[in-house]
Image (cartoon, rainbow, N blue to C red):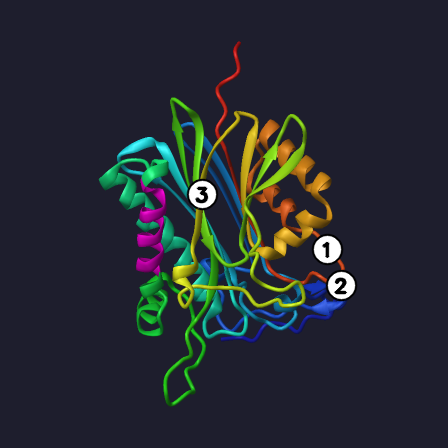
Amino acid sequence: MTAPAPYTGPALPAASYEGHRVELPLRTGSGSAGVVADRGNWGPFTVYAASQAGADHEVRGRYREDAYAFSGCSTTSSVVVIAVADGVSSSWAAHAAAGVGASQIVRTLSEDVGRNGPPVPDNWDKRARRAVHRVGRLLEPPALKRQAAAAGYQLPADTSPQGPRPPAATLAFAVCHRSELGFEVYYGGVGDARIDVLNLTRLSWRPLYPPESSAPAHDNRTKAMPRDADSVRTGCAVLADDDVTALASDGFGKGLDAQPEILGKVIASVVEQPPKASDFLRTVDWKMRGNNDDRTVAVVWSRPPREA
């Protein structure tokens, strides 16, 4: 085999972020990509989602520790299930915990709807708690190792003689049901992931799943799965046809708190003229001083067709 001639052209640029070289994690695949986006329709629903690694992870070659998942239901076109998870960086395999947590809560809830029908206010809290506890068991280290291997996640080395310390991830999820009442949303979560509603007519935001009330303002610790599965908070609401539901990690939430009008206009433009999935990445591809965290958002809306 003949060696190729050496390259003698100008220096080739390297991927960078504000002057810093962007490092790849040891192994990177589609399940652990630094940037990812999806879009699709299920029955009357339209869903968009995007996730991007923050600068702290990009420049250190660490995995994106946010994840999203969504699913229809095999027995009905009137239900779609969505989740967003955020791995706790100080815990073992945080990226895998987020990915497995988001995908498994969506799978568990969609299967529950298939067996028992859409939730109603009287049974939602019980069904949500049952699903969260089932997913919590899958996030314990032995089970997570199996789930992560099946999903293609690369896990960090286990150097502790007692085994890996428990992984941890926050979680927000929603079962959206289009019924005779309208756009019903049954939601819940553990920790500081959040669910907000954007009203397109007023371009105003309101929280469905508000921030934790027990943590002091100076304390950035949050409840997380699986250790705090008993701390799940749930609720339900009937939304207007001009409402958009947004599930987000706290990295995106900090931007939303700082610039609600700008992000409201961006998402409103997505609803008005749904773009390619790659174009939706602009909702998470922004810079904010002091916010170098991963950013993830998943939005869903259900609007009656316009009259011709």
Residue 218 is a magenta residue: no
Q: Which residue shows up at 22% across the image and 41% down it? A: 115
Q: Residue 232 appears in which quarter of the rendering?
A: bottom left
Q: From the image, tell me which residue sits under label 2.
A: 18
In the image, which disc is placed on residue 34? Answer: none
The secondary structure that most of the magenta stretch takes on is: helix
**Residue 191: % across, % down:** 51, 59
Q: What span is colored magenta in the figure?
A: 123-135
Q: Which amino acid does label 2 sit on?
A: Glu
Q: Is residue 112 at least partly visible in the picture?
A: yes
Task: Give the farthest residue toward the left.
Answer: 115
Residue 127 is a magenta residue: yes
Mark 2: which secondary structure?
A: loop
In the image, which disc is placed on residue 287? Answer: 1
In the image, which disc is placed on residue 235? Answer: 3
Mark 1: which secondary structure?
A: loop
**Residue 244: % across, % down:** 55, 34
Eyeballing the image, is 115 above or below 219?
above
Tally of numbered discs: 3
Q: Going from the N terminus, do you reach mark 3 or mark 2 first?
A: 2
Cα distance in 3D space between marks 2 and 1: 10 Å
**Residue 42: % across, % down:** 40, 33
Q: Going from the N terminus, do you reach mark 2 or mark 1 first?
A: 2
The answer to whether mark 2 and mark 1 are in CB contact below 8 A is yes
Q: In the image, which is nearer the foreground, mark 2 or mark 1?
A: 1
